[in-house]
Structure formats: structure tokens, C-alpha cells
Image: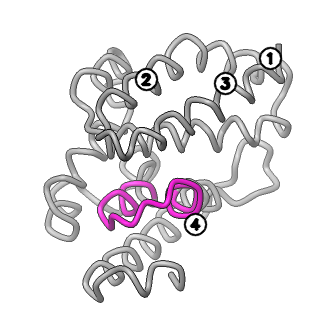
């Protein structure tokens, strides 16, 4: 929050703090796949990648990052409540980020996602790749193959959605994701 304090309004800061608390509560009893790290560290890190590495200072995008797994993994927030608290853009983005229904998920993302939503999804994938060392070899291979097949093309698509001055963000995500995939070849 201290990094965002000088550049966001009090309303935006409160919105992010609320999302942080709700994400922490929504994932309170969950652990990451390796069983050693609490799940909340994942959405927190996804938000941090946006803020620290991509220099995103948009409250709604940060809120989406913090809450990106809440609809799928907990019952504390309904889409209606999310819209009331955070606005239509956030609820639509979160619904796109939720794999419900699982069939057609990536196609929906490519067709309907905004640059903000795709940025969150790719930061999510980047963090998952960065933590692959805690997974089994078979899960590592599965994640890398899925990333090459679906997420690198999504990163390329993101670049086309971004304005000229912001394209570096999409290129950064694409390069970071490709770099990690290459380590597992």
C-alpha cells in the first residue's frame, strides 16, 4: 500500500485494502499445492507483480488480481456483491477469470477479456510458473505445455490490446513466461 499511497485516491486505496482483506479471509484455510504456503500468498503476489514489475496503478486491476480466485475457491462473495463493492468492470473481469464452466474458458478469455483482465491472468500464470519447483515433475511438464499452447498466445494477444506506450507490459509478461518455459525444456 505504501507504494500506491502517493499515486491513488483514498477511495481507490480503500477499495484495494477491502479486496486484500476479503481475499485473505476467502482463502484463509487453503494451502498451495505444495502444502507449505498459505494460498493467500498467491493472489497477493499476483497483485504485487502488477504493481511492482508492471507499474500498474489502476485500482480495479489490482482488485481483480487480489480476488481472481475468490469466486472459484470460496463462497464469501457473490458476483452481485462484488459489483456493489468494486464495480461492473471488476465483476465482469472476475467472471472471465473464473473457470466456470471450465469448457471454453481460454476461448472466452481470448474473445472477451480486456487488457486489464488478460494482464491479471498472465500475472497469475507467471506466478504459477515461478513456483513450479514446489510441484511434481508431471505437474511441471503439464503446466509448461499448457502455457506454451495457450498462455503465450494470450500474451501475444495482450500486446495487441495494449496502447503503444503500454505494450512493454505485455512484452514483459510474454518474455518472462517464455524464459521460464525454456528452463523446463
Residue drawn at (46%, 76%) of the image: 21
Local crowd size for mark 3, using a 10 Å CA cut-off: few (<14), some (14–19), many (≥20): some
In what element is the residue under mark 1?
Answer: helix
Of labels 1 and 3, earlier in sequence is 1
Q: Which residue is mark 4?
A: 28
Residue drawn at (54%, 56%) of the image: 43
Q: Is residue 110 above or below residue 70?
A: above
Of labels 4 and 1, earlier in sequence is 4
In what element is the residue under mark 3?
Answer: helix
In front: 21, or 168? 168
Of labels 2 and 3, earlier in sequence is 2
Residues tagged 1 and 3 counted as in contact (Cβ below 8 A): no
Q: Is residue 22 magenta?
A: no
Q: Is residue 160 above or below residue 45?
A: above
Give the alpha-carbon distance from disc 2 to disc 1, as whole Å: 23 Å
Quadrant housing the C terminus: top right
Which of the labelled discs sits on residue 114, or is there none?
none
Amino acid at each position: 500500500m505504501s507504494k500506491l499511497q502517493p499515486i491513488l485516491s483514498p477511495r481507490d486505496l480503500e477499495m484495494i485494502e477491502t479486496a486484500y482483506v476479503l481475499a485473505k479471509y476467502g482463502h484463509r484455510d487453503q494451502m498451495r499445492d505444495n502444502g507449505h504456503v498459505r494460498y493467500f500468498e498467491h493472489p497477493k503476489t499476483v497483485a504485487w507483480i502488477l504493481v511492482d514489475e508492471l507499474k500498474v496503478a489502476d485500482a480495479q486491476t489490482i482488485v481483480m488480481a487480489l480476488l481472481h480466485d475468490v469466486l472459484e475457491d470460496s463462497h464469501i462473495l457473490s458476483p452481485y456483491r462484488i459489483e456493489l463493492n468494486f464495480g461492473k468492470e471488476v465483476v465482469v473481469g472476475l467472471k472471465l477469470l473464473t473457470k466456470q464452466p471450465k469448457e471454453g474458458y481460454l476461448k472466452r478469455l481470448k474473445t472477451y477479456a480486456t487488457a486489464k483482465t488478460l494482464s491479471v491472468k498472465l500475472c497469475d500464470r507467471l506466478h504459477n510458473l515461478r513456483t513450479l519447483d514446489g510441484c511434481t515433475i508431471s505437474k511441471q511438464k503439464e503446466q509448461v505445455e499448457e502455457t506454451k499452447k495457450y498462455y503465450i498466445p494470450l500474451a501475444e494477444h495482450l500486446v495487441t490490446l495494449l496502447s503503444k506506450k503500454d505494450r512493454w507490459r505485455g512484452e514483459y509478461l510474454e518474455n518472462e513466461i517464455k524464459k521460464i518455459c525454456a528452463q523446463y525444456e
